[in-house]
Each structure stands twice: as C-alpha cells, then as structure tokens.
Image (cartoon, grey):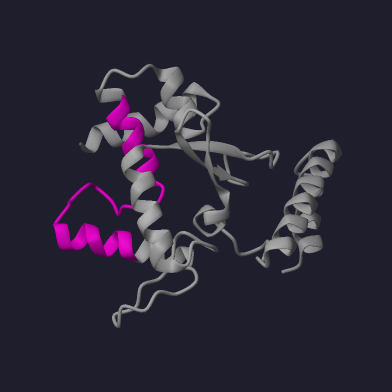
C-alpha cells in the first residue's frame, strides 16, 4: 500500500485540516528517514535509537534524544533521561559495537553482533523471556510493557502522576490511568 492510498482511506474520516497535518508530519518524518536510510513505513522507536543520539549534559547526566515516537506526534523529539548504570552499560555496548548506528541490535548464537534488530524480534525475545521465567501475567509482554511497568514502579514508589506522565510521554491522565489500572489488576 502506498502513502497516497493510506491518506485516501482517511477521506471523510477526518477533517481536511487534520489530514493536512498528518501529511505534513509524515513528509517531515520521511525526509528524516531518508537521511538515516530507514523505511518510513517500517520503522519503530527501537530502530530509531542510535548511539549518535546520546547526549551528555553539563550536569553530567546523560539522555537519549528520541527523534520520533507515537507519543511525539509533531516529530519534535524528546529527551529520555538515562541513569548512571544504564549510561555505563551503553558505554560498554558502544565499545563492543563500534559506537555508531543502532543501539538495539541482534546478537547471533556465534556471538557476532548485527547492525540492528527488527521490532518483531524484540517482541519475540520479550515473549521468550516471559515464557522461560514462567511469568503468568494475564497476557504476553511486549516492548511497550516496559513503559507501563516503569510507570507502575514509579507509582508504587510514590512518584506523582505528573512525573509519571512526563517520564512515560503521556500527555493525558486518562491514558496513563488506563494502563496503570489494567496492569495493576494483574499484579
């Protein structure tokens, strides 16, 4: 299916101004994908995280500049704070992988490291880990489960809803509450 066919399906479903904004955002995203050699119709947040997007701030704290995600509809990007332990892990991973390109990569049984990992492989590996651990959670874990899990951990530590929303990229309380209620019921 082409991009024009996708936008044609929107006809009558959304206001013309909404479709115009979607088209503009997609064109902006497509130009960025072209610059980095990605297919705009087959890309995920896991694919977009690159070593080149790591930033060290004057305070000594690190962040990952996530250029696009489903919670960043305007394509402005956002900074994701990284703790010291993860920063050290990423530094070691950068040493093993050459320090450029995608952060999330396939590791073969031989120990060789690929250049990227497809989103379907992330989902499969998360599911495999859940099965091996014998975790019965009322459904399969996904890569998105980590976002919800982190929100639950923050909630249980007494972190305010506002901070949870900022860390998880939610802009509506109703969205984060829907996730927290659903997962809290199975915990």
> Measured from the top left, where is residue 80 in percent x and y?
49, 38
Residue at point 46%, 18% (across, down): 162
How many marks are shown on the rendered structure? 0
Left or right relative to 49: residue 134: left
Q: Which sits in the foreground, 106 or 137? A: 106
Q: Which sits in the foreground, 174 or 159? A: 159
> Where does the C terminus fall, quadrant-wise?
top left
For this orientation, the residue located farthest to the left is 134
Quadrant of the image occupied by residue 14: top right
When the figure is inspected, residue 19 is found, relative to residue 142, above or below; the finding is: above
> Where does the N terminus fall, quadrant-wise?
bottom right
When the figure is inspected, residue 60 is found, relative to residue 108, above or below; the finding is: above
> Measured from the top left, where is residue 141 in percent x and y?
31, 52
Q: Which sits in the foreground, 151 or 55? A: 55
> Measured from the top left, where is residue 18 in percent x and y?
79, 38
Magenta residue span = 125-154
Left or right relative to 37: residue 17: right
Left or right relative to 38: residue 140: left
Residue at point 40%, 63% (across, down): 95
Q: Is residue 169 magenta?
A: no
Q: Is residue 147 magenta?
A: yes
Q: Main secondary structure of the magenta part?
A: helix
Q: Which sits in the foreground, 4 or 144? A: 144
Residue at point 46%, 38% (across, down): 62
Left or right relative to 26: residue 104: left
For this orientation, the residue located farthest to the bottom is 110
């Amino acid at each position: 299916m082409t991009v024009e066919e996708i936008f044609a399906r929107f006809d009558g479903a959304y206001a013309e101004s909404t479709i115009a904004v979607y088209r503009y955002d997609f064109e902006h995203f497509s130009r960025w994908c072209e610059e980095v050699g990605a297919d705009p119709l087959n890309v995920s947040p896991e694919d977009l995280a690159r070593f080149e997007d790591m930033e060290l701030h004057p305070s000594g704290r690190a962040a990952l500049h996530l250029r696009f995600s489903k919670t960043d509809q305007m394509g402005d990007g956002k900074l994701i704070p990284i703790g010291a332990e993860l920063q050290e892990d990423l530094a070691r991973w950068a040493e093993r992988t050459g320090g450029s390109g995608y952060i999330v990569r396939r590791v073969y049984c031989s120990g060789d490291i690929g250049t990227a990992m497809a989103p379907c492989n992330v989902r499969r590996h998360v599911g495999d880990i859940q099965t091996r651990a014998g975790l019965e959670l009322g459904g399969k874990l996904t890569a998105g489960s980590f976002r919800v899990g982190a929100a639950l951990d923050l909630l249980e530590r007494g972190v305010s809803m506002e901070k949870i929303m900022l860390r998880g990229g939610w802009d509506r309380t109703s969205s984060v509450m829907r996730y927290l209620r659903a997962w809290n019921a199975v915990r």
